[in-house]
Image: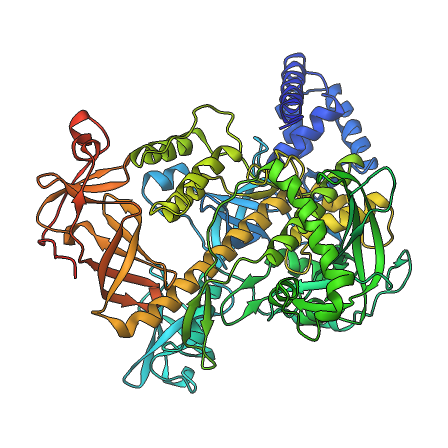
Amino acid sequence: MPGSGNRKSRRAEGAAKAKADNTNAIIHGEVPSREVLLQFITDNPDRASKREIAKAFGLKGDTRVELKQALRDLENDGLVNKTRKSLARPGALPPVTVLDITTRDKDGELIGRPAEWPEDAGAAPAVLIRQSSSDRAKGKTAVGGIGDRVLAKIFANKDRAGPAYTARVIKVIDRQRGAVLGVVRMMGEGARLMPIERRGEEMQIDAADIGEAKDGDLVEVEVSRATRLGLTRARVLNIVGSVASEKAISMIAIHAHGIPYIFPQSVIDEAEAAKPASMSHREDWRHVPLITIDPHDAKDHDDAVYAEPDTSEDNPGGVVVTVAIADVSYYIRPKSALDREALKRGNSVYFPDRVVPMLPERISNDLCSLREGVDRPALAVRMVFSAEGRKVRHTFHRIMMKSAAKLSYQQAQAAIDGQADEKAGPLLEPILKPLWAAYATLKRGRDRRQPLELDMPERKIILKPDGTVDRVHVPERLDAHKLIEEMMIQANVAAAETLEAKRQKLVYRIHDAPTLSKQEVLREFLATIGFSLVKGGNLRSNSFNGILAKAQDTPHQIIVNEMVLRSQSQAIYSPDNIGHFGLNLMKYAHFTSPIRRYADLIVHRALVAALGLGEGGITQEEEASLEDIAAEISTFERRAMAAERDTVNRLVAHHLAGRIGEDFEGQIGGVTKSGLFISLPQFGADGFIPVSTLGRDYYIYDEAHQALTGEKSGLGYQLGDTVEVRLVEAVPLAGALRFEMLSEGRKMPAGARSFHKAGGRGRKQPGTRPPRSRR
C-alpha cells in the first residue's frame, strides 16, 4: 500500500527513539523529556503517580523537584489531567475501570467499553479483555461474556495493534445485564427456561414469574437472582411467540449475537424532535430530475441518480453522472444520543421478516429518505467521464433535492426493454435512456479495470403472511442492478479521492489480497479439475477472472466460484489504506449508504468538514478514535452477517422439519475429516453427513483434492459433486440439518486415493454403514 511502509517505519523509529531516550534518562538520572513523560503516562496508567514516575526514571534529590515542575507544566498545557493520586492523558481510562462487555473481535476475543463515559468526550474507547496465562494453562475460559459488567485492570496496548487498551478482569459485577432469551418448558407448578445456545444456562422460573407464558413459548426473561445452590431464578418479561413460529427465529439470532434492537427513549425523543433541514450552506438542486431505483419493497431510499451527455467540447462522447446521497450527517451529530446508538449498532441488520435499523424510523424512513416529490437534504457528487469510461473530474455539493420518481429495479429494466408501465414510460427518454447510456460508458472503464467477477446468486427467502417459509427465490441479476452498483462504486471512489486530496482522516473500505496459504489451497484444488492458478505474490483480481470464465457453463461453475470466494480475505474498515483487491481500486471508502452503515456517516462528516459545507462535520475527537471505530464497526458487520446467516439456516431447518425421510438432490459444499457438508441450492440450506455413516470402508481425507476416498474401494466424494441425500434430522433452533448419503461414491483420481501413502495430509476415517445405491 502506498506510504504504509513509510508510516510503519516512522512509527517504529519514533518508538525506538522514545525507548532510547527513556533508557538514557534512567542511566543518567535526568528528568526525561516531555515526549518521554507523556509516553510513559500513556503506556503505564497504573504507574502514573509522581512517586512511581520518579522511581521508574531513578530520580532523586533536586531532580524530583524538576520532575514536579515538568509534570505541572504538562498539566497547565492540558496534556495531562491530575487525579487524586496520579496523572492521566485526557480521555484516558483510569487504571481500574468498570467495563460493559459489548462484542467480540474477529478472533473471538471479548471487547468492552467503559460503563461510564462523558457524553462530550466522543466515542468511548474499546478495550480488549485478556485472559491471564495462568488461567489459560489451567484450561479456564475467559472471565465474563457479552452483556456482563466487570471490574477490570486497564493496560495500554503498547504494540499499537487493535484497541488502545487491554484489560484483565478482576471480578464480574453483573452477569448478562438486560433480557435473556429462552424456551419455556412447563414442569409442575413452575417452569424451566431452556437456553437457545449450546453454552446457555438453564434457569428456574417460579409459578408467580411465568405470567401468561405457555409450554414451548420463546420468551425474554430477567435474571432475578443467582444462588450458589440450585438453578438461577428468572422472571418472564415478554412473550416473543411460539418457538414453532418462524417469526421467533430472527429474535433468536438477535439475542444470540447481542444485537441492540430496542432504541432507548432518549434516542427516540431526539429523533422525534428533529426538524426538516434548512437551505443553509446548500445549493438548490430541486430542478434536477434525480430518481431512486431500489428493491420494490424498500422502505428507505438513500441514493438517487441522474445522467446526461457532457456538452463540453474538450470531452467528446463523455457523460456526466450525478449521485445524490441522503444527508444523514445533518441529523446525526457527533456525541448525540442518536450518534452513540448508531455507533453501538454499526449497521442495519436484515432478516427475512424484519429489519433492525441503525437509525430510528423518524430518521431512516422519513427525514433522510429521498421520497418522491418531497424536499430532502443530500450530499451529491457530480462526476464527469470520458467516452472511454475514465473519470475526468468530480465535485461534491451539499444540496436540497426533490426526487422526480421512485422506481423498482424491475420497473426501470422493463422500461428499457420496451415494456414500460404508466409510471416509467414518461421517464424513458429524458431520464432512463441517458442513465443506461452513461452505464455503458462506465462499463468500459469497469471492463478495463477488471474487478473480481464472482457469480454467486443471492438467495432470498420469501415468507407467507403467517411468517412461514413460502419458497427460496433467486432474483434475476438485471442491468438495472449493475447500473446502480457501478455508479455507487464510482461515488465511493470520488469520496476517498477527495478526502485524501484534502489530507482529511477517514475510514476506508479495504480488502487485502488473498494470503499465500489460501492461494495454495485454491491452487491445489483447481489442479484436481484441470485448472491452474499462476504462482507468485503479485496476484490481481483479474487473475481469478480467467478461471471463473473457464468454469462458466460447466459442472464446476458453482464450486469454482465458491472456492475462489473462500480464498479471498475479509473486507474491513480501516483508517489506513491498502486499497480494495476485489474491486481493483486503490482508493475506496463507503459513502453511499449512511442510513444503514456508520462507516458512510463518518465519510459524510469528513467531507462536510474538509470541504467547509456547514454543520455536522467530523470532530477532532472522532478523528482520534477512527482506529477504534473502524475495528468496532468491522466487528458489527461480521456480527450482522452471522446473525443473518443463522436466521436463514434456522428458517430453512424449520421449513424442512416436516420433511424428514424425503430425498433431495444436493451438492457437496465442504469436505472435512469428520464428514461432508451438503448444500441444497433450491433451499439455500446446508447440512452435514458424518463420515461414520458413509459406509464400511475406511475414508481418507485429502485436503489438496478436497475429497474423502475409501481406502479399499477407491470410491469417494469430492467438493462440488452432485449427490442424492436423505434428510434424517432437522433441529430448527440450532439451524442444523443431518443427511444420509444415497449416491454411490465415484472413482477418485489416483492422487486422491494414494495421497496418504506419500506422507501427505490424508487421514483414515472409519465408516460403519454400507453405501446405498442411488435412487
Give the x, y percent position of residue 287. 87, 63
Q: Which residue is painted at 68% across and 50% down in the image?
A: 439
**Near-viewer residue (132 or 657):** 657
Residue placed most toward the observer, 369 or 539? 539
- Quadrant assignment for the N terminus: top right
488 above or below 202?
Answer: above
Q: Is residue 471 visible?
A: yes
If the image is split into quadrants, where does the C terminus sit? bottom left
Quadrant in the rendering for residue 414: bottom right
Q: Position of residue 586 (x, y in %)?
A: 65, 34
Q: Position of residue 706 (x, y in %)?
A: 28, 40
The image position of residue 733, as x and y in percent, is 35, 68
**55 left or right of 244 in image:** right
Residue at x 29% of width, y 62% of height: 737
Who's the residue at 29% across and 35% down the image? Answer: 528
Look at the picture and state if 387 lies above or below 34.
below
Q: Residue furthest front?
A: 418
Q: Is residue 714 left or right of residue 74?
A: left
Q: How many marks?
A: 0
Looking at the picture, tell me which residue is in the foreground, 351 or 708: 708
